[in-house]
Amino acid sequence: MIAKELLEMNAYMPVKLAELAKSEPDTALELLQAWGDGTKTLRTLWKEVTDALAPYEVKFSS
């Protein structure tokens, strides 16, 4: 059985890569190639993509 978490990562990876491509296109392309080539696990790719996006997240204070 595939974990729900992995299904969500797989589903949202293209969205996250598209977001990353707007600010760091070279990094996004490198990660896309690793995903397509199967050289990194999905969890590893997800962490690398979300870590790369972290500086660009908009923080709202309440």
Image (cartoon, grey):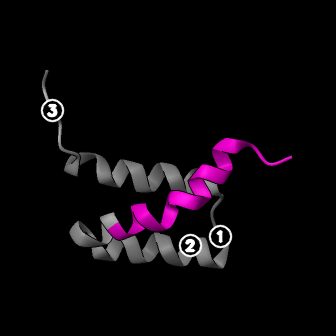
Q: Is residue 10 magenta?
A: yes
Report the predominant secondary structure element of the magenta stretch.
Answer: helix
| Residue that badge 1 annotates | 39
Task: Decide which of 34, 3 is in the foreground and name it.
Answer: 3
Residue contact between numbered discs 3 and 1, judged by CB atoms under 8 Å: no
Task: Decide which of 12, 32 is in the foreground and name it.
Answer: 12
Left or right, residue 58 beside residue 43:
left
Q: Which amino acid type is shown beneath numbered disc 2? A: Ala
Across and down, in percent, residue 7 comes to 67, 52
* Sequence-first disc among 2 and 1: 2
Task: Decide which of 5, 50 is in the foreground and name it.
Answer: 5
Residue contact between numbered discs 2 and 1, judged by CB atoms under 8 Å: yes
Kindly identify the residue that appears in the image at 67 percent across and 49 percent down: 6
Chain part drawn in magenta: 1-18
Q: Is residue 11 above or below residue 14?
A: above
Across and down, in percent, residue 15 comes to 42, 64
Across and down, in percent, residue 47 comes to 49, 48
Kindly identify the residue that appears in the image at 75 percent across and 43 percent down: 3
| Residue that badge 3 annotates | 60
Across and down, in percent, residue 39 comes to 65, 70
Near mark 3 (Cα within 10 A), the count class, few <14, some 14-19 or many ≥20, is few
Q: Secondary structure at mark 3?
A: loop
Kindly identify the residue that appears in the image at 56 percent across and 72 percent down: 34
Left or right, residue 30 beside residue 2:
left
Kindly identify the residue that appears in the image at 57 percent across and 53 percent down: 9
